[in-house]
Image (spheres, rainbow, N blue to C red):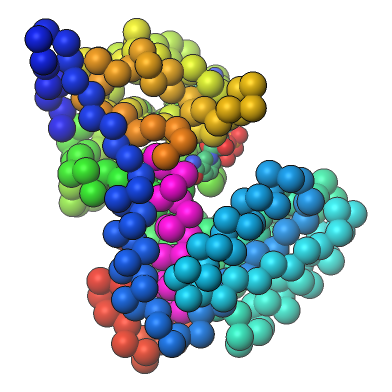
């Protein structure tokens, strides 16, 4: 994967599509969850049209997988206490196996309290301090869905990172930071990387880009990563989602990267597609954890 293919002197770049990766996850889930009462609840506090469309696609996916997906809509003027009391009810509800808080939360809600309250066993997007602490200590219980999606793509396309220079751009707790931590975990093809974590204050991003074997951009800025600056033969994973003139685009200027990178994920059709499946993979795992292994849980059910 780290060798640039060349045809008539022009380097060839593999397009790492998300659909085969997602299909693999979906068929694994279908084989496992039949007849099991898995219920994922999304706590939503915005009626933004893009959120509504995102929830519709989640509902469709859940129904195709046989998972029950419920939405709880909270008012935009809810405060931290009100939000906490909703989460506590879901924590205590034996019918609910997984909880996801759809961000952004309202201005009056301090998300750091939610991180402290959400049940770690139901916390399928790994927002709790308990799960983040485990992840950063090298013993993850859950991995955020987007991070899991990137790992699944690297695994499916057999892109080892062990011993390689990986540049993660973006340091959010949702994507960049846990991803950087996962890739530097000891052992395995998807660990042992030499990871650089860049952010808005990083100087000389272009120099960092020029020496990375694998670049993963999770920023939300179109054309942040261009072919001019990446290393020949590198792998470029584009997590970013941006709308430019109504069109979905990533952080990577794909056109300029093709011909120089050995592989790149497209937007749309790359990481996002896999993330939609990864959240349900985590939901299945939370169900396994809550049933204490009594319901046919096997070691391979751990998503990573
Ligand atoms: P976020 O919380 O806004 O974090 C963005 C990060 O990018 C921050 O760490 C910020 O640095 C950094 N940054 C901003 N400008 C930069 C620059 N010029 N150079 C280098 N770093 C810069 O965003 P997020 O939630 O992590 O999401 C990142 C992107 O991924 C967004 O486009 C989002 O829509 C997308 N996303 C996609 C999926 C998917 O499934 N495809 C899932 C989740 C998110 P500071 O920390 O210094 O501010």
Which quadrant does the N terminus fall into? top left
Q: Look at the magenta stretch and give its main secondary structure.
A: helix
Out of 191 and 297, give the one closest to the viewer.
Answer: 297
Residue projecting furthest to the right: 77
Residue 168 at what x, y percent from top left? 40, 32
The span picked out in magenta is 270-289
Say whether residue 44 is left or right of residue 247.
right
Say whether residue 86 is left or right of residue 119.
right
Say whether residue 90 is left or right of residue 156.
right
Q: Relative to 121, does residue 136 appear above or below in the rendering? A: above
Out of 127 and 247, give the one closest to the viewer.
Answer: 247
Residue 120 at least partly seen:
no
Which quadrant does the C terminus fall into? bottom left
Identify the residue shown where x is 32% and y is 82%. 297
Q: Relative to 179, does residue 81 appear above or below in the rendering? A: below
Residue projecting furthest to the bottom: 294
Residue 276 at what x, y percent from top left? 48, 54
Say whether residue 275 is left or right of residue 103.
left
Residue 36 at least partly seen:
yes
Identify the residue shown where x is 78% and y is 63%. 73
Is 49 included in the stretch rendered in magenta? no
Out of 140 and 228, give the one closest to the viewer.
Answer: 228
Identify the residue shown where x is 51% and y is 74%. 67
Out of 158 and 248, give the one closest to the viewer.
Answer: 248
Residue 113 at what x, y percent from top left? 71, 59
Identify the residue shown where x is 30% and y is 18%. 258
Q: Which of the 4 quarters of the picture holds residue 278?
A: bottom left
Q: Which image quadrant shows ligand 1? A: top right
Residue 127 at what x, y percent from top left? 57, 57
């Amino acid at each position: 994967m780290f060798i640039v293919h060349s045809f008539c002197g022009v380097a060839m770049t593999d397009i790492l599509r998300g659909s085969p990766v997602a299909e693999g996850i979906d068929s694994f889930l279908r084989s496992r969850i039949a007849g099991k009462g898995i219920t994922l609840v999304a706590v939503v506090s915005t009626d933004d049209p893009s959120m509504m469309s995102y929830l519709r696609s989640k509902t469709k996916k859940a129904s195709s997988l046989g998972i029950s997906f419920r939405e709880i809509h909270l008012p935009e003027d809810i405060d931290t206490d009100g939000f906490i009391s909703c989460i506590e009810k879901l924590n205590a509800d034996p019918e609910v196996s997984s909880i996801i808080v759809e961000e952004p939360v309202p201005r009056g809600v301090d998300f750091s309290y939610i991180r402290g309250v959400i049940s770690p066993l139901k916390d399928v997007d790994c927002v709790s301090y308990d799960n983040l602490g485990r992840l950063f200590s090298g013993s993850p219980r859950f991995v955020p869905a987007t991070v899991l999606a990137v790992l699944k793509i690297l695994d499916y396309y057999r892109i080892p990172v062990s011993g390689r220079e990986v540049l993660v751009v973006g340091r959010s707790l949702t994507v960049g930071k846990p991803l950087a931590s996962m890739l530097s975990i000891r052992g395995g093809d998807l660990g042992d990387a030499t990871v650089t974590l860049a952010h808005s204050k990083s100087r000389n991003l272009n120099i960092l880009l020029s020496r990375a074997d694998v670049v993963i951009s999770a920023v939300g800025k179109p054309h942040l990563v261009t072919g001019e600056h990446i290393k020949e033969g590198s792998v470029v994973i584009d997590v970013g989602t941006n709308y430019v003139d109504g069109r979905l685009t990533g952080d990577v200027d794909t056109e300029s990267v093709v011909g120089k990178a050995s592989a790149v994920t497209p937007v749309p059709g790359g990481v996002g597609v896999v993330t939609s499946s990864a959240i349900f993979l985590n939901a299945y795992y939370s169900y396994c954890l809550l049933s204490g292994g009594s319901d046919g849980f096997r070691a391979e059910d751990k998503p990573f």
